[in-house]
Image (cartoon, grey):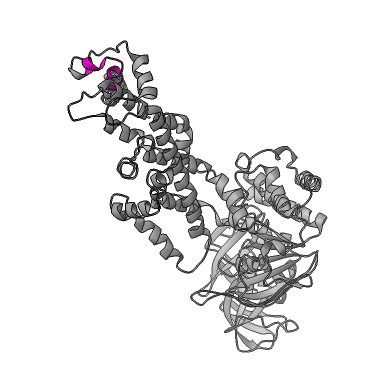
Amino acid sequence: MVEHRGFSRFLPHIVLVIGVAIVAFPVYLCFVGSTHPQDIVANGQMPLTPGPLFFETYYKTLFVGSSGSTREPVATMLMNSFIMACIIALGKIAISILSAFAVVYFKFPFRMAAFWLIFITLMLPVEVRIYPTYKIASDLNLLDSYAGLTIPLIASATATLFFRQFFLTIPDELVEASKLDGAGPLRFFWDTVLPLSRTNIAALFVILFIYGWNQYLWPILITTRDDMQTIVIGIKKMIVTADALTEWNVVLATAMLAMLPPVMVVVLMQRWFVKGLVETEK
Amino acid sequence: MAQVELSDIRKVYPGNVEAVREVSLTVPNGSFTVLLGPSGCGKSTLLRMIAGLETITSGTCKIGERVVNDIEPAARDIAMVFQNYALYPHMSVYDNMAYGLRNRGTPKPEIEQRVREAAKLLAIEDFLARKPRALSGGQRQRVAMGRAIVREPQVFLFDEPLSNLDAKLRVTMRLEIKRLHNRLNATSIFVTHDQVEAMTLADQVVVMNAGLIEQIGAPGEVYRHPASRFVASFIGSPAMNLMPGKIVEPGVVETPGGKLAFDTARFDASGEVEVGIRPEDIHVAGSGTSGIPFAAELVEELGATRLLHGNFGATPIIVAVPASGTIYENKEVRLSIGPAAIHLFDKTTGKSLAR
């Protein structure tokens, strides 16, 4: 460690404080806005201190809904987003850990071809294949369903690659010891690979949960019913551009609520997250 | 317990790399057999074929009365100890040892009993609840052996199990393995590149080179009567001195150092040969006029012995002398080499010319 003296002792802290302020101030403004009456927010005279309407606004947002182009209460949207993000994260993990296991531990013809096919999908995100994907989803009657929301987003090359790299670091002797101990491939997967991947799975869950939570384009295409929409879309729909007044306090409260679950996931799983990315249990 | 019988075993890897060529070997019931050789000689491949971790290209491998070529590793009734221990990092020591038995459906009380017994034998009872990463190298090695012991296999296979340990621990564990073998009397096959390990542990040493067996014999036998130039130079430390020679009259070979008598009852040779003399079989006769003249250019002090480095003509020679004697550096001395010290090898094939 470099030892700092005098002013230079405070310099790193000053930089950090400025950085935090830049990130945190808009969030704070958002929170302040959500506690004032809607006309104060709308006319641009919002003070920097929280207002008196915290409980009213959040109650209205969560359980009543706005008068914009979506009238669904935000609690439903939160639930939709949460279910979607969880299915996407867990589905991606389940599919990619199995395909990585197949690619690393089994010798079959065109093994590397299979791996590269998976790898190539990295170049084809949903945005690129949006029309065919939509067509298939609608032909399969998946519109306005959780299946339609999640399945097209589940196939994942990044997670497969991530698990493959991790499996390659598991010593071959462990596979051989398992063979001698009479463990077949599935047993080896269940008793050895899965427990060793715990921290990696946790790290990946954090990343993928946030990925799923923040989905915008696909949910806006696949859902039309208000009771199926996710919170990210809800925010957009609440902002009306026509003659009506946007209820900015409700919009800001929704934004605050939309931020909470990903923050909770990161905070609660932080320890595992860092562990999974930097160290391995071997 | 069972004997292991290998006949005409070959292993060819893709790309036509022949790792093991026509190896036949019998490991008697209850013996401790060491496969010894430099890295890449095929010894580990051979062991892994017995374990079932590599397929056998041709030939048969029998454990007991059963041909095991196409039998799964778990069904071969063997146990293996790996070089890097290969313990399951997420399982406790107890679970590591019990895992194989559980997979076989052994009843719980029996597993408990076998694990406790093995732990007692190896003095790891206090660590049963710990994870492997909380153990030292020696303790991990013991757990790995415990995992093998609880299975009560017909054959124990060891794949360089001591080479990850530091020098001191290696000696201790070596003794422990020997003790364990004396106690369990299980057929054991041990792979190593360390000749000291091989000499101390084995009933039967199998010296391998380039995929072939060079010699099979008891440790003393391999040391005293090496069957080839390779075995002669591989076994013994420092290595045997090798030099060109020519039989000039019956029982006398001419070397770059001078004429030496050899034992005609042991060797049948004529013409050009390769002469081998162990450093410890050469004695300093003093500074008289008889014997071979020798000047030590460099002396290595090893504590119990000293190694004198010099030359016979253009051939570098090492002589081992007791450390208590005179210091010979840069002094002309005379060496006496008895007929029993001379080994003769065929110049082209490298095979021993012993009768």
- Image x and y of residue B271, in percent: 61, 89
Q: Quadrant of the C terminus of chain B?
A: bottom right
Image point (64%, 89%), residue name: B270
Q: Main secondary structure of the magenta part?
A: helix
Relative placement, left or right, of B344 versus B221 is left
User: Quick check: B73 above or below A28?
Assistant: below
Q: Quadrant of residue A178?
A: bottom right
Image point (48%, 39%), residue name: A202
Whether residue A278 is visible: no
Q: Quadrant of residue A83?
A: top left
For this orientation, the residue located farthest to the top is A52
Q: Nearer the viewer, residue A115 or B292?
A: A115
Relative placement, left or right, of A131 versus B139 is left
User: Quick check: B100 above or below B52?
Assistant: above
Decide whether residue A37 is among the magenta residues: yes
- Image x and y of residue B206, in percent: 68, 70
Q: Nearer the viewer, residue B74 or A65?
A: A65
Decide whether residue B334 is among the magenta residues: no
Q: Quadrant of residue A246?
A: top left
- Image x and y of residue A102, in percent: 51, 58
- Where does the magenta region start and end? A30-41
User: Quick check: B118 above or below A228?
Assistant: below
- Image x and y of residue A219, in percent: 34, 42
Q: Nearer the viewer, residue A30 or B31?
A: A30
Relative placement, left or right, of B29 versus B211 is right
